[in-house]
Image (spheres, rainbow, N blue to C red):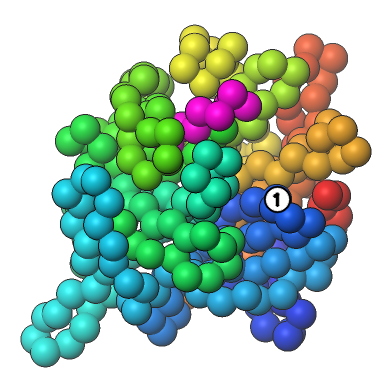
Amino acid sequence: MKNGKPWPDTDGNPIHAHGGWMLRHGGYIYWYGEDRRDNHYVSCYRSADLENWEFRGHILSTDTPAEATGGRFDLKLSWEKDGKTRKVNIERPKVLYNERTKKFVLWAHYENGMDYRDARACVASSDFPDRDFAYHGSMNPFGSMSRDCTVFEDGTGDAYFISTARDNADLHVYRLTEDYLNVAELEKAIYNHEYREAPALFERGGRVYMISSYCTGWAPNQGKWCSADSVTGRWGLLHDFGDKTTFGSQSAFVWRGGQNGERYWYVGDRWMGGEPKYFESTYVILEIRFDEKGDPFIEWSEETKLII
Ligand code: GAL
């Protein structure tokens, strides 16, 4: 793929998987992301080689059926005003496969579509990676504001939801319930008043790393990386990652590939930033390298090939 240039799917249409996430399952990689056109919310593409992406459908839209789970979440995915249907905003969707329940569980950021004051997390799930999702609603985890978000599996079967809290000032780390359908515990509040957004986590050699952006809306800024002995452990200082604008991008997620999962790629969005397509992006994908101290870094390159 060419960084910062439109990336067409196998039908020749630009891939709309903004603020996205890739999940490896059953011989395919599924790429989920935002698509705010028409009545869509979340799109899903599938690939066997990480180069050719087949559009599979919109797994979340205004038509997705609502299905309450245990919690009393708000099940609205659209609302009426002046006789018109208004969309909500669903941002930064992430999908995990739960081995216990055999379900694909989606977590994302929810807003009412008019402003960013709801600051909620939302959940959906399906028996399939690319269809038949049911929407389980939105809520403020343990009463907290929750905006930019990601998920992280620690390899023991536990999964975590990480999101910005307190008007983006801090990051919260929540452990998910065993079925991944709710938050079980607020494990930690980290990076007090640092306004870190767009968190993207990965594990390497037993350490957990996080790449994040600063909080400047759709405009790119200096990315930072930090690390901890575990996701709920002691997080260290923030260090620069990429250049002053993270090469004109904002972090979405990290792809881990290579024969033994020893290679890592930063995947970011280069947001259009202005009307009418402010919420669309091209992609910036750069291999993460590690210096002699083991510190991660990226360098600009025009083209990148992701490896399974
Ligand atoms: C960014 C955030 C995006 C979107 C945008 C809205 O900071 O990372 O996901 O919420 O703000 O202005």
* 157 is within the stretch colored magenta: yes
Residue 92 in view, yes or no:
no
Image quadrant in which you'd find residue 251: top right
Q: Name the spot of residue 132 as percent of width and height, x first.
A: 47, 70
Q: Dominant secondary structure of the magenta stretch?
A: loop
* Residue annotated with mark 1: 24
Q: Name the spot of residue 191 as percent of width and height, x first.
A: 40, 22
In magenta, the rendered stretch is 154-161
* The furthest residue to the front: 101
Q: Is residue 229 left or right of residue 136?
A: right
Image quadrant in which you'd find residue 269: bottom right
Q: Is residue 96 left or right of residue 63?
A: right
Q: Is residue 198 above or below residue 174?
A: below
Q: Going 52% across and 39% down the picture, which residue do you hit?
A: 100
Q: Is residue 38 left or right of residue 231?
A: left
Depth check: give the residue in front, 229 or 219. 229
Q: Is residue 37 left or right of residue 81?
A: right
* The furthest residue to the left: 82
* The furthest residue to the bottom: 83
Give the residue type that dot 1 points to: Arg
Depth check: give the residue in front, 284 or 34. 34
Q: Going 51% across and 52% down the picture, which residue do you hit?
A: 103
Disc 1 secondary structure class: strand
User: Image quadrant for the N terminus?
Assistant: bottom right
